[in-house]
C-alpha cells in the first residue's frame, strides 16, 4: 500500500484527463507547495458526503485517481492555479484525519484484460459510437474533432470514452471504479448507444408538420 494526500471534489478524474484547480485554502496551499517541490502527486476523490471547502469530516468515495501537477500559476496571497493530469486509479483502504487534509492508504489498480474476445468486439464497437457522439456534439458548436486522433487500442479507447462522456458524477464514478476492462467496454457501448440516440433527438429541429397541440385546461 501507498500513502496519498487526498483532494475531495465534486468531480471525477480519469487517467489521462486534465483538471484545472484554483488553490486558495491555507491547508491546500501548504500541501500543494510541498507536492510541487517534491514532484509528488495527490489523489482526487469524488465527495460522497460533505463539502469541498473547510470540511475535515468530508466522506469520499472509495475509488479515485492520482493527479500529477503540471502547470502552476502563482497568484497573490499564496493562491495558485494548477493544471493536473490524471494518472493512476486507486482504491482507499484507510483514511487518516490527523492532518489538516485527508491522507489515505491506497492500493493502485487498473481494469484487467479479463475476456479478450469481449474486449476485442466491444472496443471495435465503441470507436464508431464515439465518433458519432462527437460528430453530433460538434454539429451544435464550432468545435471539430479529427477522427484520426481517436485511438484503436482497447484500453486507450475505453479511457477516452470515459473522459469524453457527458454524464453525472455518479455514473462517472461507476466507470472509474470498474476493475474489469471487458465490463468497462460493454458498459460504455451501452451508454454511448443510448446517449447518441438521445443527443440526436435533443438536437434535431422539429419537422414542418410539428404541432404543439391544444393546451389542457388543467
Image (cartoon, rainbow, N blue to C red):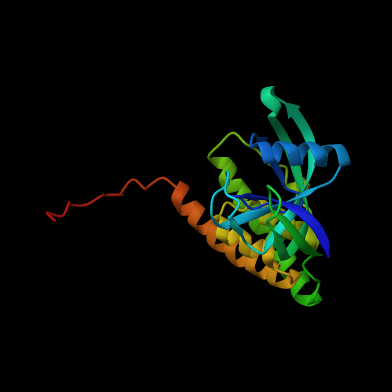
Whether residue 73 is situated above or below residue 212 in the rendered picture: above
Residue 76: percent from left, percent from top: 68, 22
Q: Residue furthest left?
A: 217
Which quadrant holds the N terminus? Answer: bottom right
Residue 122: percent from left, percent from top: 71, 68
Q: Is residue 202 left or right of residue 30?
A: left
**For the point 74% across and 59% down, which residue is it?**
104
Tell which of 83 and 103 is nearer to you.
103
Instruction: Answer yes or no: is residue 152 visible.
Output: no
**For the point 79% across and 61% down, which residue is it?**
155
Q: Quadrant of residue 173?
A: bottom right
Tell which of 182 and 150 is nearer to you.
182
Which quadrant holds the C terminus? Answer: bottom left
Q: Is residue 71 left or right of residue 175?
A: right
Whether residue 51 is situated above or below residue 38 in the rendered picture: below
Q: How many marks?
A: 0
Q: Quadrant of residue 138?
A: top right
Amino acid at each position: 500500500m501507498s500513502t496519498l494526500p487526498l483532494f475531495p471534489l465534486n468531480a471525477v478524474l480519469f487517467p489521462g484527463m486534465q483538471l484545472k484547480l484554483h488553490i486558495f485554502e491555507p491547508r491546500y496551499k501548504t500541501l500543494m507547495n510541498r507536492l510541487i517541490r517534491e514532484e509528488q502527486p495527490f489523489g482526487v476523490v469524488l465527495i460522497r458526503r460533505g463539502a469541498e471547502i473547510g470540511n475535515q469530516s468530508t466522506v469520499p468515495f472509495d475509488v479515485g485517481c492520482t493527479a500529477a501537477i503540471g502547470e502552476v500559476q502563482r497568484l497573490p496571497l499564496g493562491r495558485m492555479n494548477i493544471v493536473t493530469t490524471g494518472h493512476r486509479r486507486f482504491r482507499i483502504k484507510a483514511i487518516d484525519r490527523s492532518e489538516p487534509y485527508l491522507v489515505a492508504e491506497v492500493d493502485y489498480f487498473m481494469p484487467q484484460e479479463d475476456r479478450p474476445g469481449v474486449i476485442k468486439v466491444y472496443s471495435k464497437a465503441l470507436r464508431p459510437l464515439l465518433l458519432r457522439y462527437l460528430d453530433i456534439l460538434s454539429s451544435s458548436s464550432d468545435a471539430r474533432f479529427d477522427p484520426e486522433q481517436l485511438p484503436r487500442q482497447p484500453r486507450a479507447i475505453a479511457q477516452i470514452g470515459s473522459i469524453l462522456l457527458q454524464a453525472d458524477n455518479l455514473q462517472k464514478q461507476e466507470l472509474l471504479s470498474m476493475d474489469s476492462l471487458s465490463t468497462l467496454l460493454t458498459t460504455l457501448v451501452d451508454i454511448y448507444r443510448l446517449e447518441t440516440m438521445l443527443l440526436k433527438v435533443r438536437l434535431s429541429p422539429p419537422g414542418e408538420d410539428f404541432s404543439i397541440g391544444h393546451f389542457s385546461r388543467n
